[in-house]
Amino acid sequence: MKKISLAWQIFIGLTLGIIVGAVFYGNPHVASYLQPIGDIFIRLIKMIVVPIVISSLIVGVAGVGDMKSLGKLGGKTLLYFEIITTIAIIVGLLAANMFQPGAGVDKSKLAKTDINSYVSTAEQTESHSMIDTVVNIVPTNIIQSISNGEMLPIIFFSVMFGLGVAAIGEKGIPILNFFRGTADAMFYVTNQIMKLAPFGVFALIGVTVSKFGVTSLIPLGKLVLVVYGSMIFFILVVLGLVAKIAGFNIIRLIKYLKDELILGYTTASSETVLPKIMEKMEKLGCPKAITSFVIPTGYSFNLDGSTLYQAIAAMFIAQMYGIDMSIMEQITLILVLMLTSKGIAGVPGVSFVVLLATLGSVGIPVEGLAFIAGIDRILDMARTCVNIVGNSLAVIVITKWEGYKLKDYQEQKVA
């Protein structure tokens, strides 16, 4: 009997979850039964992310060996991230101006959703500048940073520790072997957890559909279409062009990451696929030093889907309230989003928090977010996929930029 591949198992779980959610739409008991299953799966993934990032980074950085090479890698990575996320914001603004998703929307027919859960987080981050972000990269207590899952301090410590291991030469070999073994063991654990992915997908999508249904999309259908259309355009055209320049094919990359994209779309969380993305990029021929540095850093600085969505959502609310934003005001919005989207990366519900912290500063009513909060999960699923493709492509680009060659894609096909 032929074994069903993981991709098909996840797809079956996705389909069954949609059916169950549609059949029991509006039934609160569905969430009480299915949510714990989804939560357990998400917690299992979060459990392994930090150990994988730390061990992979230490091994990778120790392999690079010197601060000069690492600084060069970091500079190229951050430059690439800034360029691509800025393009994402511009694409979002162009799409919003072209299709006007908020024009003519009757606010009285939209369901208003409570956004208080995001407000307190936004208030704490409104005064959070880029300088604060840079200062907070350096941890005062690495154990506390690990406990809180603060990725940037973890990356900083791991890089410094990896350089230290490289600097002490032979004395560092036992330490390096320990972390190499830890990384290998954690990737094994990842593969075991991924066997539960179809159940997690079934539960999470079932809860989503049972809560919102299809009817919730109708009043805001134009916004959903513009967001999804813009993200497809961004992946195929913008990232496709970047991939072509790097000597790779974006369609091949999407096929190679099909399992992770389905999982990321369903869970609306890039974090769920971080370990597998790192593993697959290494199999593709990307050096561990580049993979282990670029992907975790990208989760804070290269959220292409999130920044694209934020630009469209901001313009949607302005159009809904009849606010005509000038070119200069839109340029101001680009500059503000470039800063705020980086300054509070890693916060739960980050796209909503960024918008709450941003809209008031460019004269757009923050209250408008309450009208799209109800479908944010549907939009979050799409922007997660863009984030995954964007970060994976970033590894390929930096690998080529550093002068490495990738393996033949055909050798990397997975069952």
Image: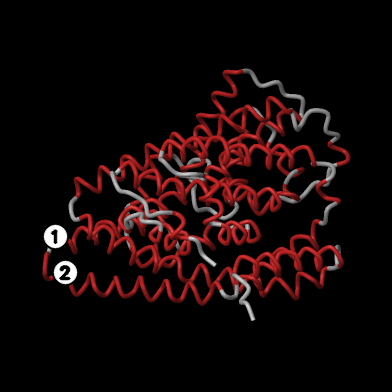
Instruction: State left or right for residue 342 relative to residue 166.
Output: right
| Gap between marks 2 and 1 measured at Cα | 8 Å
Instruction: Verify CB contact (< 8 Å) between mark 2 and mark 1.
Output: yes
Q: Quadrant of the N terminus?
A: bottom right
Q: Position of residue 251 (x, y in %)?
A: 55, 47
Query: Tag on residue 190?
Result: none
Q: Position of residue 254 (x, y in %)?
A: 55, 51
Crowding at label 1, few (<14), some or many (≥20) Cα neighbours within 10 Å?
some
Q: For residue 313, which quarter of the picture?
A: top right
Q: Quadrant of the C terminus?
A: bottom right
Q: Position of residue 153 (x, y in %)?
A: 36, 56
Q: Is residue 15 above or below residue 311?
A: below
Residue drawn at the location 50% of the way across and 61% of the way down: 413
Looking at the rendered structure, the secondary structure element under dot 2 is helix
Residue drawn at the location 51% of the way across and 77% of the way down: 192
Residue under numbered circle 2: 172
| Residue type at numbered disc 1 | Ala
Residue under numbered circle 1: 167
Q: For residue 26, which quarter of the picture?
A: bottom right
Looking at the rendered structure, the secondary structure element under dot 1 is helix
Q: Position of residue 89 (x, y in %)?
A: 56, 33
What is the number of callouts on the image?
A: 2
Which sits in the foreground, 341 or 261?
261
Q: Is residue 329 above or below residue 381?
A: above
Crowding at label 2, few (<14), some or many (≥20) Cα neighbours within 10 Å?
some
Instruction: State left or right for residue 372 relative to residue 251.
Output: right
| Residue type at numbered disc 2 | Gly
What color scheme is it? secondary structure
Residue drawn at the location 78% of the way across and 37% of the way down: 222
